[in-house]
Structure formats: structure tokens, C-alpha cells
Amino acid sequence: MRYTLVIPAYNEAALLPSTLASVRQAMQACSHPGELVVVDNNSSDDTAEVARAGGARVVFEAHNQISRARNAGAQASESEALVFLDADTRLPPGLLQTALDLLAGGACCGGGASVVFDRPNQDVERALRLWERLSRRFRLAAGSFVFCLREGFDAVGGFSESVYAGEEIWLSRALARWGKARGMRFEIVAEPPVVTSARKLDWHSRPFLVFYALLVVLFPFITRYRWLCGLWYRRPPHPP
């Protein structure tokens, strides 16, 4: 099964090299043929140059929106399967193979993976345990890693461009419904987990992150407005 691995990236020159290194290793170990696409989402740093140096094909998306960047990467390919990985997330050996084997088997329409952070934090680990329960119970993929059949992705319209965050939740639900109607499941792979950056813990206080999470849960409509989704789009001028 041919696949395209899409990485949306906005000013990710610092973390992209380690992500691309993990992807190259996973792709080399994978029996399915594939390509790597990085979507430069109107970066002001060297994201595009770093991506090309790391062996990726670069696609440019001018509108700074995560869902548009993901969709642009998908539209630039003709592969049977799509895999989406965040630019600050490392892909462990074996996960890519597992995800594509599930799709190739014909009983899975898509899915996600477990997530761990790149450094221990007690509060974060409690939040992740809660997320794992919700993810498995309701079949919701974390945006860090999403995989699906191209047919299903196209049928549900891809990632929603009416939201600036949480687009993976809407896609998970839509794909699960599409798959169920065809006797296929939406699968959350337990092992191995993807390893994602905990850098937001350095950029924001714990009370702010908790408040913001509650705000999104209670008022999900705020994700329709970019200016209210600063957690995903705004960074400190000089990150620690």
C-alpha cells in the first residue's frame, strides 16, 4: 500500500530535524512504499530549507491554519494511504508499519496512536492517562499521529477548515462513521506511542493550560476563530 506521510510545519526549523530523522528511520524499516511531504505553512524561519535538507518534498500553504496545511499535503499526493505527523513529534520504529498493515488488511479505515511526552511531568502524565481513556473509548486520534485510507479521507472532506484547532477530532468522528458503514473500524494503536514535545509547558503556566483546556471543552466553538487559538499559533518571541 503506497502512502504519503504529511508533516504540517509552521516555524519548526528547530525541532524538525529530529522529527525527520525519526521518520526516515521508520520509512526505511517499513515494507510499504511511501513519500515524505512537509507543508511549509507560511513560515518565517528556515522550515522549508530544513525540510528539503532532510529529504522531504516541500509544499507551500500560505494560509496559516493547521487543517489547511494538512489538507494541502494530502492534495499534493495520490497515495492510497495518508499519515499525518506533527512537526514536533518523533515517530517510533514499527508504528508506521503497524498503521499501514492495518489499512492494508481491509478491516481498518484509519486511526491514531498513544502519545507520550519527551520528558516526564506528573501533571501531564495524569492528563495523558485521561486522554488515553477518552481516545480509546470514543475512538479519537490525537493530532500528533493520524492515519487513514485516502478513499475515506476524500469521502469525508478531509480535515475541517472551519476550525483552527481540534480538526483531528472532527476527522476521527467522520472517518469512524464512514468506516462503520463499510464494516471497518477506526483503530487507536497502543504500542509503540509517538513521542511529542512538551514545550508548551515551558511557554505557558500550568493554570493557564488547564483553564484553556476547560475553555475548549466547554465552548468548542472558539476553535472556529484563529485569534482564540493562540495556544497553537502564537509562541513567545524568545522561547526558553
Image (cartoon, helix red, strand yellow):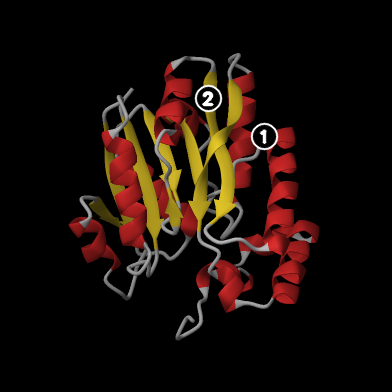
Q: Is residue 174 visible?
A: yes
Foreground residue among 160 and 30: 30
**Side (left or right) of 227 relative to 239:** right
Dot 2, how many residues are within 10 Å of its Cα: few (below 14), some (14-19), or many (20+)? many
| 152 to 74, vertically: above or below | above
Residue sitting farthest toward the bottom? 237
User: Element under label 1?
Assistant: loop
Residue 75 sits in which quadrant? top left
Q: Around disc 1, counting alpha carbons within 10 Å, would you say few (fewer than 14), some (14 to 19), or many (20 or more)?
A: many
Image location of residue 119, percent across then percent down: 55, 61
Q: Which residue type carries mark 1?
A: Arg
Q: Are marks 1 and 2 in contact (CB under 8 Å)?
A: no
**Residue 134 drawn above or below residue 9:** above
Mark 2 is on which residue type? Cys
The front one of 22 and 186 is 22
Between the residue at mark 1 and the residue at mark 2, the CA separation in whole angstroms equals 12 Å
From the top left corner, tell me how far across and down residue 153 is, in percent: 48, 34
Q: Quadrant of the N terminus?
A: top left
Where's residue 48, x and y in %?
A: 25, 63
Q: Residue at x 39, y 38 (%)?
A: 93
The residue depicted at 65 percent of the width and 39 percent of the height is 140
Q: Which residue is labeled 1 in the image?
A: 139
Give the residue displayed 33% in from the left and 45% down from the top. Answer: 23
**Considering depth in this image, is 179 or 46 the residue closer to the camera?**
46
* Residue 76 is at least partly visible in this image: no
Q: In the rendered view, would you say 2 is above or below 157?
A: above
Ranked by sequence position, the earlier of labels 1 and 2 is 2
Q: Which residue is mark 2?
A: 109
